[in-house]
Amino acid sequence: MSRTATYYTIVTWKGEHWGHVVMGNGPEMDFSAPPDAYGHPGVLTPEDAFVAAVNMCIMMMFIWAAERFKLNLLSYECRAEGTKLIELDQTETFTHVRLWPKIVVRAGGEDPATVEKRVRRALEGARKYSLVANSIKSEVILEPMIEVVE
């Protein structure tokens, strides 16, 4: 049986190109448009939040999958980059989000090639079950670097 969950944010305009967001889970912060869209540098932007949401969700789902696949995860770090297309009429769309996860796992006496295959399967599962990645029309591209150590 399907079920639902609801998440919320509240945004408030602070003047000029400034806003403030309060997230349902507690954090709050100021935000702006990016500097190339008449915003301010050094603060959260909707574009940053979009790319970060994809990156964070994939990571959390990978952690879940790594536990299920009994991986001895030593580290996970991921750089993500969103590419937006700006049309002639100035409409904008993120065409894709590319992620470069660096994953280090311990083999623990297992064949390193077998462990790496499990890491790749866990990453595929993370992509498959990522709420955010499944909710956007942008292509999500994973280009992992996997290191298996003894």
Image: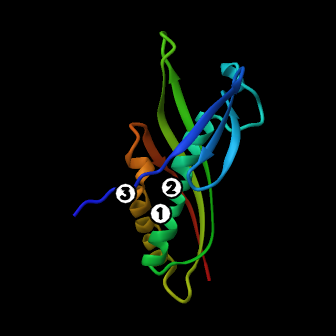
User: Residue 111's x, y, as percent?
Assistant: 49, 83
**Identity of the residue drawn at 62% across and 39% down:** 48
**Identity of the residue drawn at 62% across and 83% down:** 150
Q: Amino acid at mark 2?
A: Cys
- Whether tag 2 and tag 1 are in contact, CB under 8 A, the answer is yes
**Identity of the residue drawn at 50% across and 56% down:** 58
- Whether tag 3 and tag 1 are in contact, CB under 8 A, the answer is no
Q: Amino acid at mark 1?
A: Met
Establish if 90 lies above or below 144: above
Q: Residue furthest right?
A: 42
Residue under pointer 3: 128
User: Residue 38's x, y, as percent?
Assistant: 70, 19
Structural crowding at the residue carrying mark 3, measured as other residues with C-alpha within 10 Å and reported as few (<14), some (14–19) or many (≥20): few
Left or right relative to 65: residue 33: right
Decide which of 125, 11 is in the foreground and name it. 11
Indicate which disc, 2 or 3, sits on the residue closer to the N terminus.
2
Establish if 66 lies above or below 84: below
Which label number is shown at residue 61? 1
Q: Amino acid at mark 3?
A: Lys
Query: Do we see residue 93 in this rendering?
Result: yes
Q: Give the Cα distance between marks 3 and 1.
A: 9 Å
Residue under pointer 2: 57
